[in-house]
Image (tube, grey):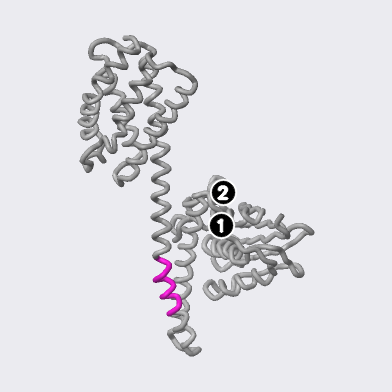
Amino acid sequence: MMSNQASDRLKQNAEKIMAMWEKRAREEVGASTHQTSLVLQDSLPLYLNQLVDELSNRIVRTSARITADEVESTRIGKKHGHERAGYADYSMTQLILEYQILRQVIFQVLEEEAPLGVEDRDIIIGSLEQAVNDSATQFSETLRDIQELFMVTLTHDLRNPINVVKMGTQLTLRRLERGDTHVDVAARMLSAINRLDSMIQNLLDASRLRAGQSLKMELEECDFLMLVQDVVEDLSFAYGDRFVVVSESEIRAFCSRKEIRRVIENLAINAVKYGAPSTPITLTLQQTETQISLTIHNEGEPIALDAQSILFQQFRRTICAEEQTGWGLGLFLAKNITEAHKGTLAVESAEGKGTSFIINLPKVLL
C-alpha cells in the first residue's frame, strides 16, 4: 500500500476507528466507565488528522513543515494527557492502555484489505510512540500541578484554625498558676500544636521545592551557641535533660535564624526518636576561619548503609522509622535548607559509634 493509499484509507475510516476505539476503551479501561465521551475535546480526531498528513506523500516535507508537524503532534498529545489528568480515576497505566488499543484498532482497520507497507507501519508506530510520550509527560505535569494546588490550599486552610487553638492555649497557659495540675496538660497541648504547625510548614516548603521555588530566608548575623542553647532549652521541656552542648568560644555566622533552628530541631528530635533511650544527645559546635560545623550525635543502633542512601529523600522512610509519625520530610528539608546556605549536611553511622549528623556552613554567604 503506497503512502497516499494509507493516508486516504485512514481519512475515510477515521470515524470507524474512533468508534471501535471507544467501544474497546469502555470495555478495557476502567476509568472510562464514568465518562460520557472518551474523545474529550476532539483530541483523538485531531490526532488522526495529524497522522493522515504524516502518511501522505502529497505534502512536501520541508524542514519547516517537519518542525510544524512535530509541534502540532506534541500539542495534541499534551492535550490528551491534560484532559485525562483532570479525572481522578485515570492512572498512567490506563492512559498508555488507551494508546495501545488505538494502535491495534488503526492497524486492524487499515489492513482489512491489504497489509501496510514497511514505511507506513514505521510512520504510524513512530507517531504513536511520540504521542504516548507527549501525553504521559503532560499527564504527569498536570497531575503534579493539581496536587501542588491541593497541597497549598489544604495547608493554608489548616493554618487559620490551628493559629486560633495555639493562641488560646498560650493564653490559658499564661493564666494558670504554677503548681496547677492543668499546667502540664496545657503545655503538652501547646507542644502538640507546635508539632502540627511544623508539619504543615514542612508540607508547604516541600511543595515549593518540588515546584522549583526557593525557600524564603532572611539572613542575619547569628550567635550559633545561643541558637543551639535556645533549641536545647525548648526540647528539654518535652524530652528531658538528655542534651549536652559542647562548644568553643563565641561562634558567629550569617544565616536565616528561623530556618537553621528548624534544621537543628529536626536533627535533635530525630536523635531522640531513633537513638538509644536515656542516653545523652551531644551537640558539638566547632569553627575554622571560614566555616562552622555542628555535629548532633546519638548512641544506639547504626543506620544501615542502604538506608543512608534514602535518608534525605522526600516522603521516604527507613524500616526503623516506619512506625514514627510525620510526613518523612524533615531530613529532606533539613538538607535543602542547609544547601540553600551554601552548606552541607552529612551522616556518619557505624556499629558501636552511634549516629552523627554533621552540618557545615560558611561563616559568610557569597
x, y percent for residue 265:
57, 65
User: Split into 4 quadrants, where in the image is the N terminus?
Assistant: top left
Residue at horizontal 49 percent and vertical 85 percent from the top:
174
Q: Quadrant of the C terminus?
A: bottom right
- Residue 289: percent from left, percent from top: 79, 59
Q: Nearer the viewer, residue 59 or 181?
A: 59
277 relative position to 19: left or right: right
Q: Residues within 10 Å of mark 2 (few under 14, many from 20)?
A: some
User: Which residue, given by chain and number where applicable, does mark 1 sit on?
Assistant: 215
Q: Is residue 165 magenta?
A: yes
Q: Amino acid at mark 1?
A: Leu
Q: What's the distance in space between the residues labelled 1 and 2, CA to CA?
A: 25 Å
Q: Which disc is residue 112 wearing?
A: none
Name the side, left or right, on which 59 lies relative to 293: left
Is residue 270 one of those drawn in magenta? no
Whole-percent x and y of residue 213? 53, 52
- Give the residue number, with chain letter if any, for mark 2: 308
Point out the stretch of residues depicted in magenta. Answer: 158-168
